[in-house]
């Protein structure tokens, strides 16, 4: 059936009232949903045997049923439609059954026209698409069968809000780009059940009209601690798999790689990798994936792997990503090591009596810098802290800070190097 622009505009006007009865964010995803079509067919009164017969005949979605023949709702002659149904079902529907098929066809046709209208009039203010409930349930059951070892309780099952948020990544199918879903937004089904279903919110549609929309009351989850953060990673992996954008196995392998880094023992003088570090690494990975899969989200590689999966596997070990998972040094570890390695001889050169003086306070002499033999700072003001490596003043070597010149305090040396690093060329 060939549509021209005038014919499409006429059809949209004729079905405009009926099309408006649909939730605009739901019907667009329901158009090609097999689960949503079967659920609606059973709801209007079509028997399960006839639904299976339609599926066997290739009519398994609203879009296929809307264009199965040349009949249009309101044209008057519906023999073409019922002749086609007779070829599939083996008998022409009659009576109440006929009215059920008329209703289902009219809804299918209205959904198809509404989808065409949205594509023609699409703007930034257009509503984002979400999965119908029947489609969510079907995909979730399929995921449970695929991974029987995963216990998808209400505390681990992705919430409907999270699925819809990631399915807005399905809206990214039309934009052909990937966007990151923050881990703090990866809510579970349990708090969604316990809380209010939704809250009213005022917004503007594409024509600038005020409308009241529903928003889930549960929008964020806690990711404090390794257990809660790991659960958020798993819920997001499930949601991306349900959205058919990335595979659960690939996303879980990335999550496991991050948490393996947390449990690795760091080198001496370095701390364990923190949860903040792996969150930053995860964000950097998705930035890289978005760059690599731009305009290629829906495609697959020559081996049949999803482009997003291939990008995740390739970029998970990118230096810009792994940089965030490197262990950080402990606080004051450099000072402690330098004190043990460089200044211990100076401590040994101190007179023993200076450490054993009594009667002048318990901490007398503590923290003082002792000048080694053969060194001086009398004739020229020399920074003693520079020579023992603890001066914090950011100036060039050889220049003067508030404590003195940054030169070696060895007699007749005065090279622009600390005493412990200087070769003392020209000194006596």
Image (cartoon, grey):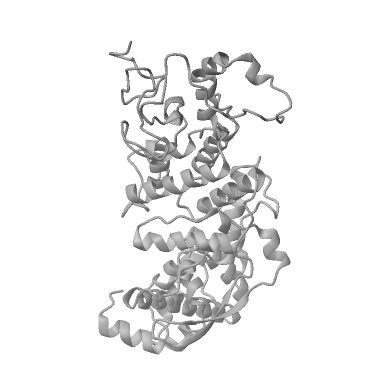
Q: Residue furthest front?
A: 379
Query: Residue 402's x, y, as percent?
Result: 41, 40
Q: Is residue 34 above or below residue 398?
A: below
Label count reads 0
Quarter the C terminus occupies: top left
Query: Residue 35's x, y, as percent?
Result: 55, 62
Query: Residue 379's x, y, as percent?
Result: 36, 26
Quarter the N terminus occupies: bottom left
Depth check, front residue: 34 or 17: 17
Image quadrant of residue 3? bottom left
At a point 62% along the width and 27% down the height, the residue shown is: 365
Depth check, front residue: 359 or 232: 359
Q: Is residue 264 above or below residue 11?
A: above
Depth check, front residue: 87 or 53: 53
Q: Inspect this view and state whether residue 348 appears.
A: yes
At a point 49% along the width and 37% down the height, the residue shown is: 325
Q: Inspect this view and state whether residue 58 appears.
A: no
Q: Is residue 411 left or right of residue 283?
A: left
Q: Residue furthest top?
A: 428
Q: Is residue 413 above or below residue 164?
A: above
Depth check, front residue: 38 or 142: 142
Q: Is residue 222 above or below residue 164?
A: above
Query: Residue 105's x, y, as percent?
Result: 48, 76
Image quadrant of residue 355? top right
């Amino acid at each position: 059936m060939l549509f021209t622009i005038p014919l499409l505009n006429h059809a949209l006007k004729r079905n405009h009232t009926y099309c408006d009865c649909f939730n605009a964010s739901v019907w667009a995803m329901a158009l090609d949903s097999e689960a949503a079509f079967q659920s609606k067919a059973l709801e209007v009164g079509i028997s399960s045997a006839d639904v299976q017969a339609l599926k066997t005949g290739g009519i398994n979605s609203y879009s296929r049923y809307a264009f199965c023949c040349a009949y249009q709702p309101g044209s008057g002659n519906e023999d073409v439609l019922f002749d086609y149904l007779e070829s599939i079902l083996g008998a022409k529907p009659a009576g109440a059954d006929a009215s059920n098929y008329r209703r289902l066809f009219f809804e299918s046709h209205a959904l198809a026209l509404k989808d065409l209208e949205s594509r023609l009039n699409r703007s930034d203010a257009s509503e984002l698409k979400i999965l119908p409930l029947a489609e969510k349930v079907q995909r979730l059951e399929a995921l449970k069968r695929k991974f029987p070892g995963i216990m998808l309780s209400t505390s681990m099952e992705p919430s409907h809000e999270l699925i819809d948020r990631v399915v807005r990544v399905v809206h990214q199918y039309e934009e052909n780009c990937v966007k990151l879903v923050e881990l703090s937004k990866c809510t579970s089904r349990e708090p969604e059940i316990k809380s209010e279903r939704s809250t009213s919110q005022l917004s503007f549609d594409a024509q600038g009209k005020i409308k009241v929309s529903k928003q889930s009351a549960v929008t964020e989850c806690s990711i404090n601690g390794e257990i809660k953060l790991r659960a958020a990673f798993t819920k997001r992996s499930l949601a991306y798999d349900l959205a058919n954008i990335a595979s659960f196995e690939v996303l879980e392998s990335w999550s496991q790689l991050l948490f393996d880094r947390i449990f690795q023992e760091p080198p001496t003088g370095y701390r364990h990798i923190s949860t903040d570090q792996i969150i930053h690494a995860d964000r950097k990975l998705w930035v890289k994936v978005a760059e690599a899969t731009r305009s290629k989200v829906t495609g697959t590689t020559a081996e049949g792997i999803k482009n997003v999966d291939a990008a995740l596997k390739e970029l998970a070990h990118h230096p810009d990503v792994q940089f965030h998972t490197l262990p950080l040094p402990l606080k004051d570890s450099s000072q402690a090591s330098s004190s043990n390695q460089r200044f211990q001889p100076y401590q040994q050169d101190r007179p023993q009596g200076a450490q054993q003086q009594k009667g002048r306070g318990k901490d007398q002499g503590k923290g003082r810098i002792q000048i080694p033999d053969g060194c001086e700072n009398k004739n020229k003001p020399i920074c003693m802290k520079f020579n023992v490596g603890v001066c914090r003043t950011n100036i060039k070597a050889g220049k003067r800070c508030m404590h003195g010149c940054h030169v070696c305090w060895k007699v007749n040396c005065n090279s622009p190097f600390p005493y412990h690093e200087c070769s003392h060329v020209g000194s006596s």
